[in-house]
Structure formats: structure tokens, C-alpha cells
């Protein structure tokens, strides 16, 4: 028989075992709750990030099956080194790829306002997980003028498409605020094309316009990228008129050159509202600005209109250059695009060059990127399409909106080299 001491020891042992089991259960429950809270927090963060997509608003044309190619709210300002670039050998490497990034800090180029360039990597290695795809070695994305055409001929579309997807994936980890734009849904043509708070154009009374400053090669805020002006009859009268705001922006930024890269109507869809008088000699009033069409010329390169803008009893001349026949889903003819850019390059204008298409990122991004690449190539004798687009996306999300447009830039620069423009 057990004596009293044995009974006490057994009781203590059972009690300790019970306490241990309870502690394990409590720890398991606590751990599970913490995992659930973290998942809930992550889901909430994702909802906040994607809130700007405004599912009740139309999305831009690059969305496939309701899913964007990448998030438009996307630069991790605390870790800019996460942003990467790519260059790969020919052949497509399939959908499943492993990305290995090597960072290199690029020195900033001094300018009149000392532009500060973010740290950007210049090499990336794609390792295919497929059994038949070739392995790719890390290659520098910067190319000399003499080697660029050979690289372009070697890569062609499939590899450039893969390169563009890497650009998209880097944007997907970028976080920038678009809170101001979220408050003015009716003034945004597309719910997923919004200016960053820290780089948007602000009108004199603090009014909102969907427009962003973009640096040139060596000139601070050389461009303004903006959506095409809207009128209230667009999209079933669910939008506000922004034509008045557009002309206020032109006036307040002292702009004297407007680049239009879209037709007002394409494929029976309104892409941009008319914001100038319909006939020579006529005038229209847009808010506080009175705009008169003084001259108009048409040639194979573009339509050019000379506008007289009067505001507060002061008159200024504004030139509009309208590049036609470049539809939203198509690539521009590279020779025509180069002729168009060089015509404007050879002129002198006050203020920033105001560039718009429909959304203000696709064709607008191709135009500005090609301009900057031409200037950089002429001064540095080097070309880096990836990092040029990357830098623009730091100032306005989704610049150069599709792989076709990205390929169009390569094609334009290759043509410029072939035609000895650089």
C-alpha cells in the first residue's frame, strides 16, 4: 500500500502534469491568435493599398481579367535598394523565375537644382525553374550606343517582355501615398492612375489635378505628365469637368508647350475632351482663362496650334503639338515619333512641357522616356531603358504602362542609332 508521502508525491506530479498541459494549450491558443491577428493586419494593409483602385470606377486598359499588372501605389522610401533592374539573354524564360538582385549605387548627376537620384541596382540574374529554358547570366542593363542595336536585335520582344515584368514586380513592393488623389475620385479618369502626394502639381488655391512633375535628363521638373482633360459628359456624367483645372495648371506653371498624344475619340471611346476652340479665330472661356485659336497647321509629323491665353488681363502664347494616329493599344511608328520629339527639342519654351495622352502614363511615359534617353545618349554615350523608366515611376506610377510600350522605347532608340540621330 502507498503511504501518505507517496500519495502526496503522486498528487504533486499529477498537478504539475495538468499545469504543463494547460500551459501548452494556452501557448498554442495564443500563438494561433497571434497568427490570425497578423493575417488580419496584412489583409487590412492590402485593402488600404488597393483601395485606390475604386472598383466603382473604370480601370485603365492594361488590366487583365480584373487584375492589374502591378499595384499603382507602389517606392519603399526606407529601403530604396529593393528596387531593381534586369537584363537577360534571349529566349523567354517562362512564367516561374527566381530573381537574384545585385545592387549598385549610382551617383547622382548634378543639375541646376541638384537632382537627387535614388540608389538603383544595375544587374539582375534570372534563373529559370523550367527544365528546358536556358539559364541567364547577370548582365549590365546599361549599354553603349555601339552595342545597343545588337542587344536589341538579340533580345527582341519576348525577353523585353520578361524585363518589363521584372520592372512591374519591383513596383509591386513600392509604397507611396496617393491619399489626396483618393479624395477626388470624380477628377480621376481611371481609379488606378493617381499622382503621388509628394510630387503632384498643386494649383494656387490647393485644388487637385491629376498631374505629376517629371524630371528631364538634366533639368528639374522639365515635364508635367497629366491625364487628358475631362468634361462632365464623359463616363455617364460620373466625372467632374477638369478642362478649367487644366488651363489653370498651364497658366500657373507658366507652361507654353502642350503635347497631345491621343485623339479625342479612339475606337468610339472618348479619350480626351476638347480643350481648345473648334475653329480658327474663335475663343472659348475655360474658368478664368480665355483661349483663342490664332493659327493651325497640319503636316505629316503633327498638327500644331498656336493659342492665345488671356487670364487676369495678361496674355500669353501657348503652342500645342498634336501627334495623331497613335492609338492607346498600339506602338508609335519609331521614325515618326523621333521626328516629333526632335521638332519640339529644337524649340524654346517657358515653363515645363505639359504632356498628356488619355491616362497620362502610357504614351506619355513612352514620349518622356524616349526624350530623356536621347539626351542622355548624346551626352553620356550610354543607354539604360530599364532605369530610365524606373526613375520616372518614382515620380508618377505606371509610367510606360505595357510591355508593348516598353518595347516601343527600345525600338525608337534603336532606330535613332540606325538613323545616326545619336
Image (cartoon, helix red, strand yellow):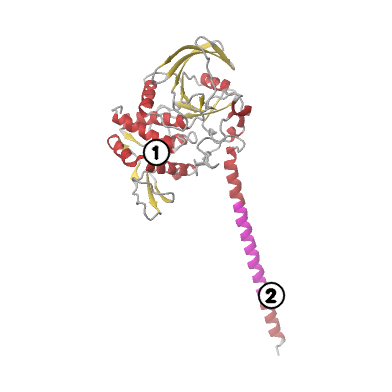
Q: Is label 2 or label 1 in front?
A: 1
| Residue 108 visible in rendering | no
Residue drawn 56% across the image and 12% down it: 312
x%, y% of residue 30? 64, 60
196 vs 299, left or right, is right
134 vs 6, left or right, is left
Q: Residues within 10 Å of mark 2 (few under 14, many from 20)?
A: few
x%, y% of residue 121? 39, 43
Q: Please state, as top left, top right, bottom left or bottom right, where the C terminus lies in the image.
A: top left
Tag 1 residue: 386
The segment highlighted magenta reads: 14-39
Residues at marks 2 and 1 touching, judged by CB atoms closer than 8 Å:
no
Residue 48 vs residue 266, the one in the foreground: 266
Farthest residue, direction right: 4
Numbered disc 2: secondary structure: helix
186 vs 171, left or right, is right
Residue 411 among magenta residues: no
Numbered disc 1: secondary structure: helix
x%, y% of residue 283? 54, 11
Residue 309 vs residue 240, the one in the foreground: 240
The overriding secondary structure of the stretch rendered in magenta is helix
Residue 355 vs residue 155, the one in the foreground: 155
Residue 209 vs residue 105, the one in the foreground: 209
x%, y% of residue 172? 50, 43
Q: Which mark is residue 15?
A: 2
Q: Residues within 10 Å of mark 1 (few under 14, many from 20)?
A: many
Residue drawn 32% across the image and 29% down it: 416
Q: CA distance from mark 2 to mark 1?
A: 67 Å
Sequence-wise first label, 2 or 1: 2
Amino acid at each position: 500500500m502507498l503511504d501518505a508521502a507517496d500519495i502526496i508525491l503522486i498528487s504533486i506530479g499529477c498537478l504539475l502534469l495538468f499545469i504543463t498541459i494547460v500551459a501548452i494549450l494556452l501557448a498554442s491558443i495564443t500563438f494561433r491568435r497571434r497568427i490570425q491577428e497578423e493575417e488580419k493586419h496584412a489583409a487590412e494593409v492590402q485593402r488600404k493599398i488597393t483601395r485606390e483602385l475604386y472598383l466603382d470606377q473604370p480601370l485603365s486598359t492594361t488590366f487583365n481579367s480584373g487584375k492589374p499588372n502591378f499595384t499603382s501605389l507602389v517606392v519603399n522610401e526606407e529601403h530604396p535598394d529593393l528596387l531593381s533592374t534586369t537584363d537577360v539573354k534571349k529566349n523567354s524564360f517562362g512564367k516561374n523565375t527566381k530573381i537574384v538582385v545585385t545592387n549598385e549605387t549610382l551617383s547622382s548627376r548634378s543639375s541646376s537644382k541638384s537632382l537627387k537620384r535614388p540608389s538603383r541596382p544595375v544587374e539582375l540574374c534570372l534563373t529559370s525553374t523550367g527544365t528546358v529554358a536556358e539559364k541567364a547570366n547577370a548582365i549590365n542593363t546599361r549599354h553603349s550606343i555601339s552595342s545597343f542595336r545588337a542587344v536589341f536585335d538579340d533580345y527582341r520582344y519576348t525577353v523585353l517582355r520578361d524585363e518589363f515584368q521584372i520592372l512591374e514586380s519591383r513596383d509591386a513592393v513600392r509604397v507611396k501615398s496617393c491619399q489626396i488623389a483618393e479624395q477626388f475620385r470624380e477628377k480621376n479618369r481611371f481609379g488606378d492612375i493617381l499622382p503621388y502626394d509628394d510630387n503632384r502639381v498643386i494649383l494656387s488655391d490647393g485644388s487637385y489635378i491629376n498631374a505629376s512633375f517629371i524630371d528631364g535628363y538634366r533639368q528639374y521638373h522639365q515635364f508635367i505628365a497629366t491625364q487628358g482633360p475631362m468634361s462632365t459628359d464623359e463616363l455617364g456624367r460620373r466625372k467632374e469637368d477638369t478642362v478649367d483645372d487644366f488651363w489653370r495648371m498651364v497658366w500657373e506653371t507658366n507652361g507654353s508647350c502642350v503635347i497631345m498624344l491621343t485623339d479625342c475619340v479612339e475606337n468610339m471611346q472618348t479619350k480626351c475632351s476638347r480643350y481648345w476652340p473648334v475653329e480658327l479665330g474663335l475663343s472659348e472661356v475655360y474658368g478664368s482663362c480665355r483661349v483663342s485659336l490664332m493659327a493651325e497647321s497640319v503636316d505629316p509629323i503633327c498638327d500644331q496650334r498656336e493659342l492665345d491665353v488671356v487670364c487676369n488681363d495678361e496674355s500669353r502664347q501657348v503652342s500645342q503639338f498634336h501627334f495623331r494616329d497613335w492609338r492607346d493599344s498600339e506602338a508609335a511608328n519609331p521614325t515618326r515619333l523621333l521626328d516629333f520629339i526632335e521638332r519640339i527639342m529644337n524649340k524654346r519654351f517657358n515653363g515645363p512641357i505639359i504632356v498628356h495622352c488619355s491616362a497620362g502614363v502610357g504614351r506619355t511615359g513612352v514620349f518622356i522616356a524616349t526624350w530623356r534617353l536621347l539626351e542622355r545618349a548624346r551626352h553620356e554615350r550610354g543607354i539604360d531603358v530599364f532605369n530610365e523608366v524606373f526613375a520616372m515611376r518614382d515620380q508618377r506610377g505606371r509610367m510606360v504602362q505595357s510591355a508593348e510600350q516598353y518595347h516601343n522605347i527600345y525600338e525608337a532608340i534603336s532606330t535613332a542609332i540606325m538613323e545616326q540621330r545619336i
